[in-house]
Image (cartoon, grey):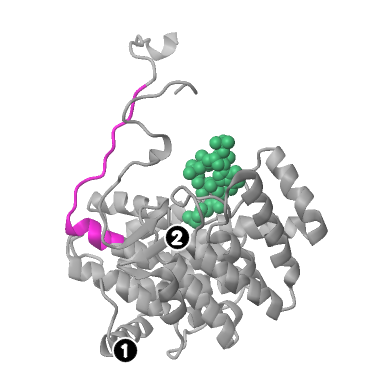
Amino acid sequence: MSATTTYPNYSPGLEGVIGGITNISEIVSETSTLIYRGYDVHELASKGSFEETAYLLLYGALPNRAQLDEFVTTLKNEREVPTEVYTALKQLPKDCHPMDIAKVGFAVYAPFDPDYAAPATDQDANRRKAVRILAKASTIVGNGHRIRNGHEPLKPKAEHTIAQNFLYLMSGNEPDAKTAHVLDSSLTLYAEHGYNASTFACRVTVATLSDIYSGIVTGIGTLKGPLHGGANEEAMKMIQEIGSVDRAEAWIRDALATKKKIMGFGHREYKKRDPRAIYLTKVAKELCVEKGQTQWSEIADILENVMETEKGIYPNVDFPAAYAYYVLGIPIDLYTPIFVIARVSGWSAHVLEQLANNRLIRPACIYEGPKSATWVPVDER
Ligand code: CMC
């Protein structure tokens, strides 16, 4: 399309286009609010556990005590993956990104799922698969990290939550309570977000009546990009590149002058503040003080101020997540895989919703190529 051509009913990037109807979450840009099935995400992140949020997304209501206990027990029982998955991960080049490890991990595990052969429309089987996917995500990411760094995978511990399981496998050490708590609330914030690119891609995949694992692998591949989940890693690399508080203002002004995209800022849906970022910024800044690393929050303050005054653009969830994870000692290339550990719950909820009332997702496009080319035999071209 030439820069000036516009077509009726066509919106580049599908901006503003309604892609479907959902009961899972709602984003309200004007009030900077995000609700999961009616509950404000701040309340879920501050009062509940990620496991409760995942249950809410998958089953449609918060669990009572007995339901939560049963769900947590199932998650713990399903946490391990077959050794074939680890064998496959060991074949990967050590410099491949952990998002590729996650993608391969789920692709290899899929045929081992006891419900793998169930029809795509078997919703009971899909929910059982969704629970297994949720249970195994932190293990695949955590032990995938070990394998990539030349260590043997560890056996997950029954007493750990999903957040603790990831931290334990990642480091080989018992996670401290504060780190596990911050990670747990960030998982809730990352769990679900309407028709974002990876969720939409996941719905497109399962709407063909392919299987839930194909949807999850599609989701992981889509989340990897820096305009989506990959932004949390890029944001931290940017903060590191700036390096010191006295360089921050000149750096950001120069970046804007040269039309650079500032990672961790802006959002298609939120024109004001991202509510997830409001919550996580407070947590991240407190953590910087606690850990004696206020240089990161001071750099963040300067970037936020300049972006707001010069562009009217605010941080999204990936910006505070970046330096919160950094001061917690999490390696940068695991930030987007952490997003996977959380978002598998949202993707799976959308798979169930899509298949409950399925129709193939197949938009049209406008052809602008040549229309009457003349066939010339291959040796005469
Ligand atoms: N830095 C500088 N300028 C920006 C930014 C940014 N981060 N975001 C938007 N803009 C400007 C952009 O240059 C454009 O200006 P102009 O009209 O003058 O060319 C205008 O704002 C609209 O930007 P857009 O890229 O067309 O907006 P979009 O709705 O297509 O993209 C976005 C949304 C999130 C991809 C974009 O804001 C962006 O690239 N942000 C950086 C990457 C990022 O942080 N992604 C994470 C998104 S939220 C969590 C998640 O899903 O992972």
Task: Choose top left, top right, bottom left or bottom right for residue 25.
Answer: bottom left
Under mark 2, the amino acid is Lys
Q: Is residue 53 left or right of residue 246?
A: left
**23, 141: nearer the viewer:** 23
**Can residue 149 be seen from the camera position used here?**
no
Quadrant for the N terminus in the image: top left
**Can residue 271 be seen from the camera position used here?**
yes
Kindly identify which numbered label has been placed on residue 69: 1
Q: Position of residue 144 (x, y in %)?
A: 52, 70
Kindly identify which numbered label has been placed on residue 115: none
Q: Is residue 358 left or right of residue 54?
A: left
Extreme residue toward the right, this view: 246
Task: Choose top left, top right, bottom left or bottom right for residue 238.
Answer: bottom right
**105, 323: nearer the viewer:** 323
Q: Earlier in the sequence, mark 2 or mark 1?
A: 1
Report the residue marked by disc 2. Answer: 103
**Which type of secondary structure does the marked residue at label 2 adopt?**
helix
Under mark 1, the amino acid is Asp
Q: Which residues are magenta?
A: 350-367
Q: Is residue 230 above or below residue 42?
A: above
Q: Is residue 108 above or below residue 160?
A: above
- Neighbour class for label 2 at 10 Å: few (<14), some, many (≥20)? many
